Amino acid sequence: MGSVDAMTTSETAPRPRRRLLPLVAVLITIVLVLGAVAAAIASVSSDDDPDAGETPTPTASPSATAGPASVVAVPAPIDAGSVAGVVAAQSSTADDEDQRAFSTLTLAGDTSLRTATDAIVSAGVAEYEPRRSPGSANELNIGFDAVLAAGPYLGVQATTFLYTGGAHGQSRSQALYTDVTADRTWPSADLVGDPQQLAEWAGVALGQADLSETAPEPAEVTHDVRFGSDGSLVTVMDPGEPVASAAGAVAVRIEPAQAATLLTAQGSAIRAAAMAGQPFAGSTAIPTATARATATATVTSAPTRAPATGDVDCSKLKCIAVTYDDGPGPYTDKLLDELKAAGAHATFFQIGKQTASYPKVAARELAEGHAIGNHTWTHPDLRRLTPDQVNSELDRTAAAIKKATGFEPVLVRPPYGATNDTVQGVLKGRGESAILWDVDTEDWKNRDAAITTQRALAGAHRGAIILMHDIHPSTVKAAPGIYRALQAKGYTLVTIPQLLGDALKPGGKYFSE
């Protein structure tokens, strides 16, 4: 008769129905077996994935494909001014081809943090100096922020920015953690026991976010590690590590369960303190800075405007404006005493970090008739920033000034006096003016009261704006002599608003009257 393949579907040769029954039975059996296998595979996957079910297996071993990491925003620092015992210090230069600014945080009586801080600054200087390019606005900016204050532990993060010519500068960060009771400090890299696993998880997160197809090196994920109050861990990677520099710093968060497996014993102790939310133990030493006792105050009712022209008519008087940058600091109170004794007024251009650390000093400046201006948060060369970055620098400082004094500044002194059309456009949009100077005492360089005095008096003229810094003890020492000598020559020492009055316009740039 022929094979099954040779049969037709005609009525004269029908397919025998009884032959289909065994085949159907076999197919049903295969389907049932495959369904059981699929269910078993799904069950195993659910056990490996903590997010797949309501009751994940607590002892499941994490893997790079389990997804315990995700890209997040870089964590914001905490207010160093609210941390007991922390001393903020600022220093800067005003050299066009060698712009340096250091903003440090230390603990009174703690030598280990100071040693670690000094080492970071020294390393930055050693890298920067041989790379400086003649004719370029070389810049070295090193700033410290507080990132943790819990139990006996203080965490600080240092950001080092170098520019020595070319299109872009180089930025890197490093976190340090100090046990104030033991006076011991560790870089965050020493707190990670399994850097390879951290790098693998971070690499998966970067890939999932389409930021990089290359996993970072272990050293790239351990230099700046932060601890969350929920037990999570955040690694902050520098621009170019391994994400393109244009993306800026990138942060990856590790879930609490997996974060616990990555740390050394000391790292686990710091994580536990962060989770417990313990009050910061603070330093047992008494800060040498006179203003630290007032650092946590906030003004709730204060003048909403700076002194305008008052009773001073600079069209008739021989007016001159003394201005001070980079404060407030540990010597500003003494300077205010000297101004009060002389019956003189000045203008203070404040670094936001310093305002946050010395709010009562800032409030005293305004209360005693002085003017306050914005000198940015980290003292960068604004010409190298985008408009959004310029606004961020000014916004953060303006917020700190308002919190401390109740006043919103409209005067801005660009660090190093460095400005351009882009910066001026930002200022115009904000309704603010750039205040520069025409008499530079170079007190930051000479650190000598006699030289500072000589330069201030030699450059003095009617309508002049004199630049000094209230962060140097030598400048404060020079103050009473400068005031007396200027007044003896018939000068009236006034604020910038008193000197310029209605001439101040948004987006304007002023060197003198």
Image (cartoon, helix red, strand yellow):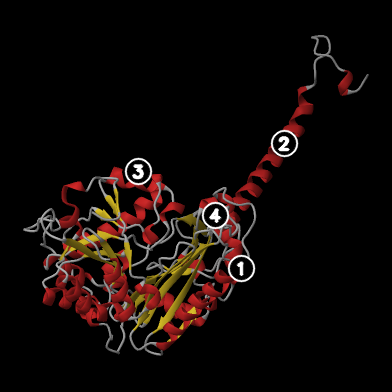
Q: Are marks 4 and 2 in contact (CB under 8 Å)?
A: no
Q: Residue at x 12, y 65 (%)?
A: 369
**Amino acid at the residue labelled 2:** Leu
The residue to which callout 4 is attached is 168
Is 201 on the left or on the right of 180, as rendered? Answer: right
Of the numbered discs 1 and 4, the one sitting upstream in the chain is 4
Question: Disc 2 or disc 1, which is closer to the eye?
Answer: 1
> Which mark is drawn over residue 218?
1
Q: Secondary structure at mark 2?
A: helix
Q: Which residue is mark 2?
A: 27
The amino acid beneath tag 1 is Pro
Between marks 1 and 4 in the image, the one whose residue lies nearer the viewer: 4
| SS state under label 4 | loop
Question: Quarter holding the C terminus?
Answer: bottom left
Residue 377 or 375: which is nearer the viewer? 375
How many marks are shown on the rendered structure?
4
Q: Position of residue 89 (x, y in %)?
A: 34, 75
Separation (CA) of disc 4 from disc 2: 67 Å
Closer to the camera, 493 or 137? 493
Disc 3 target residue: 425
- The answer to the question of whether label 1 and label 3 lie on touching residues, with beta carbons closer than 8 A, is no
Label 1 or label 3, whichever comes before in sequence order? 1
Q: Position of residue 437 (x, y in %)?
A: 31, 59
Which of the two discs, 3 and 4, labels the residue nearer the N terminus? 4
Above or below 47: residue 19: above
